[in-house]
Image (cartoon, rainbow, N blue to C red):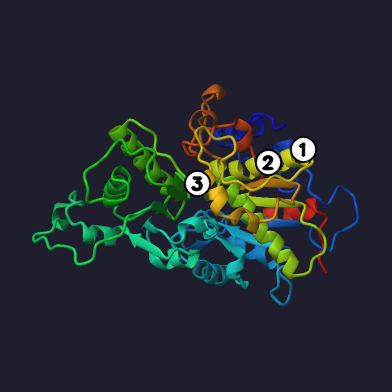
Amino acid sequence: MRRALRPLRALLRAGAAGRPPRFPALNGLCGAPAAEGSGGGDSELNILPSFGFLFDIDGVLVRGKTPIPAAKTAFQKLVNSQGQFLVPVVFVTNAGNCLRQEKADQLSHLLGVPISQEQVMMSHSPLRMFKRYHEKCVLVSGQGPLLDIARDLGFCQPITIETLREKHPLLDVVDHDRRPNVLYPSAVELPKIEAVVLFGEPVRWETNLQLIIDVLLTSGYPGNPYHRENYPHIPVLACNMDLMWVAEAQSPRFGHGTFMVCLENIYKKITGKDLKYEVLMGKPSKLTYQYAEYLIRAQATERQWKQPIQTLYAVGDNLMTDVYGANLYNRYLEENSRKGSKSRIQAKVAGGRGSATLSQDDERDNSWENELASAAAAHCRSVLVCTGVYNPHAEVPLDTRESITETVFHGHRDFRFDPGLVEPDHIVPDVDAAVDLVFQLENFAPN
């Protein structure tokens, strides 16, 4: 049982008082005993990995397009002289505006080591298993090469917001300069939209919000009048719940989670009912970590590492996504271990209030959960770095009952705030220190 944020508050108060926080670079969190890895204390050194890394990208490896200096140093320790990884590594990002190969190429350039697309997990990666929707007409929202991304995931009939706007020019009228002067009838009628897929934050929020609401309130026929009795609405599948993220600016920037807050509140204001999600993916959802573990095990199998992967180390900069998600998954793994059984993978958000789960039709029609073996790891440890969203020097009230950490929950609406889930197992200055810490915990000394 984690102590309720006392170590984290102590670290924060030290920063607020002007004293540099003391980072336990090779120890447990602020003097607390180090959480066990799979290597043990003084046992002999291990040359084969029984653990894997889940690395966040923004705020851990880069800030915007600028590499964090510690990242290159860290990754030189993770590869051999031939550029092969010494341990299984997956990059788990909540970004969703590009293809996996593009992100892998970016990381290879930034880190100076070869990264394959099989090591990259975008927030939308698990959508390739939701085959029930692949043949349906789906509206996709976000930015970047949306049609390429959707088709790469298996969707056969994706439609962008821009296409919908062109076919229904009367719907988008917030920007007076974009209102059509002459209306032409659409030459091609669009099929019924049967689901909405939210990949990430769009560029023109007002357009996306308006047209998504139109689709939800007309059961997929946005040119028709609203029918508020159509509830529940057509399925909404959402990726990336980050309220904020860090780039080069001094303060965090709006993320897709902020866009989702707008959409949810507009829908409820109009209908008086909650917008429901068929599935939420991206950190901190359990589904994301299950898929990431699947990728870790696939790497270990490909490299013919016979030792089972027992521990996952999730390295991130955000308490409400990286730490919350890793701790939530660790709780799931430990519950499975106590029960002595391996539960089937579900897309339900554990511990969430009003969280969405797959319908019975999905369970019956889709075998996507069978594509992932049951969880095999024993632990998922959270490692918080101080190069991104988390700021150890942030001011906190003297009265810890008013601590921002405890009173303002930046997680998604469908996740319940649990103080134990936002307390990291370890806090380190940067990703290089995180790698050193894990190697020590695992007594890992590759040849």
Q: Secondary structure at mark 3?
A: strand
What amino acid is labelled 1 in the image? Lys
> Can you say whether 306 is above or below 320 in the image?
below
In which quadrant will I find the C terminus? bottom right
Q: Badge 2 is on which residue?
A: 332
Front disc: 2 or 1: 1
| Residue beneath the point at 59% across and 38% down | 350
Q: Position of residue 248 (x, y in %)?
A: 44, 55
Q: Badge 1 is on which residue?
A: 339
Label 1 – label 3 distance at C-alpha: 26 Å
Q: How many marks?
A: 3
What amino acid is labelled 3 in the image? Val
> Can you say whether 418 is above or below 183 in the image?
above
Question: Is any atom of residue 432 visible in this view?
Answer: no
Label 2 – label 1 distance at C-alpha: 11 Å
Categorize mark 1 by other alpha carbons within 10 Å: few (<14), some (14-19), many (20+).
few
| Residue beneath the point at 71% across and 60% down | 297
Near-viewer residue (66 or 167):
167
Q: Residue furthest bottom?
A: 82
Task: Give the mark nearest the N terminus, 3 or 2.
Answer: 3
Quarter of image, res 267: top left
Categorize mark 3 by other alpha carbons within 10 Å: few (<14), some (14-19), many (20+).
many
Q: Badge 3 is on which residue?
A: 279
Near-viewer residue (319 or 259):
259
Task: Give the mark nearest the N terminus, 1 or 3.
Answer: 3
Label 3 – label 2 distance at C-alpha: 18 Å
Residue 181 horizontal side relative to residue 186, left or right: left
Categorize mark 2 by other alpha carbons within 10 Å: few (<14), some (14-19), many (20+).
some
| Residue beneath the point at 55% across and 58% down | 129
Q: Position of residue 288 (x, y in %)?
A: 58, 51
